Amino acid sequence: MTETATRSATRREPAGERDKRTRTAVDRWFALYPALALAALLPVGAVTPLFPVEVGVATFALGTLAVGMAHGAVDHLVPLRAATNVSLRRSIAVVSVVYAILGGAVVAAFFLAPVAAFVGFIALTWLHWGQGDVAALVVAGVDHLPTSAERWLSLVVRGGLPMGVPLLAHPGEYRLVAEWIVGLFVVDANAAAAAVDPVFVPETRLAVGAFMLAATALSVGLGYRRVRGGASRRGWLRDVGEVSALWAWFLLAAPVFAVGVYFALWHALRHVGRLVLVDDRASAALGDGDLIGALARFARDAAPLTLGGFVVVGAVGLSVPAGVAAPGDLLAVSLVAIAAMTLPHVVVVAWLDRRQGVWRPGAAG
């Protein structure tokens, strides 16, 4: 077939078929294959508790540099691409104001009440990472989560695995990170350690573990009931397989290493795939089998604000009272900066969720 004939055939292809093929490609490259890769890394994760925590810090830094910081760096274009009546100027202006106000509020919270801000960051990340996974399941077209309540339950489970399970399985390293973060704003190390005590008492850890087990069992059970009622078994098995892999990953791997790999390989890539779908040119490229072209377009759009994100990290590092003198301090500064960018990012993603009907009963995305 000549190139002209190929283009003509592409133009004649029904839009629905092309969209379906593109969504399948997004699910395969940005969700399914990364999930399989994480499962394949389980033996590596299992031995990471034997390594110094600095190995996890380096892994987190590499993942953040490679893709983690970039995944939210196209937020300023989301309203433009996901709505029909938003100009480029308005899209950039509104998102910039949201980032400035909410990001500044988060940094102020860490200065004023670092322990409360740390707990708030954990809760916000729990919400956001669950939010991202539910959207990915919608893109995959699963039909065993037809109601908003079932999707919210899935959010609780999916977001809670990276945030709650390490607290149960590896409290020592989890606490160390909390002390590093609080220690940026509380110069007395003993005071920083005492401040995070309530988060790490056995009662808190056991309560979180019991809650996660119960929520997982309920979500899996309700999904199976949907399968018995006619929903696709394949989609439910995919969901159960991913949840099982995440349980194993966060039970076995050292927390900093586990979160660093998850952030880059799982959460960030799924969001990048979602952004490809709302970019007509990137979506068309992927639909034609041009994965590199779609990624190159995303990388071009994300490059300026990815660099801006690292400027935010530097600004936080220069402003904290305790200074930055060790790898742990660098990780803590990065997490505070990420917290400042996460809150406005969650707002943008929530708007996109609403626009795409992620939480409407029976929505297919």
Image (cartoon, grey):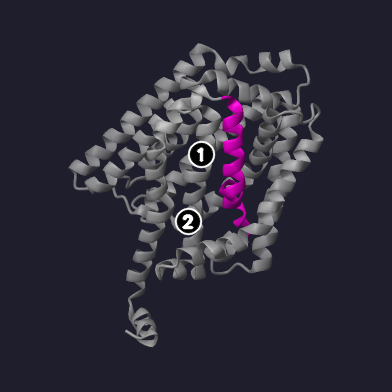
Q: Residue at horizontal 58%, vertical 24%? A: 52
Q: Are marks 1 and 2 in contact (CB under 8 Å)?
A: no
Q: Quadrant of the N terminus?
A: bottom left
> Which residue lies at the image location 65% right of the left edge and 58% below the top edge?
303
Q: Nearer the viewer, residue 217 or 30?
A: 30
Above or below residue 217? Residue 228 is below
- Could you say which disc has been placed on residue 261 in the image? 1
Quarter of the image that includes the C terminus = bottom left
Label 2: element kind: helix
Q: Is residue 92 in view? A: yes
Total marks in image: 2
Q: Which residues are magenta?
A: 52-76
In the rendered image, residue 65, in percent from the top left (x then y), is placed at 62, 46
Give the overall secondary structure of the magenta segment.
helix
Residue at 29% from the left image edge and 50% from the top image edge: 143
Q: Is residue 50 magenta?
A: no
Query: For residue 274, which numbered disc appears in the image?
Result: 2
Is 60 inside the magenta-drawn segment? yes
Q: Amino acid at mark 2?
A: Arg
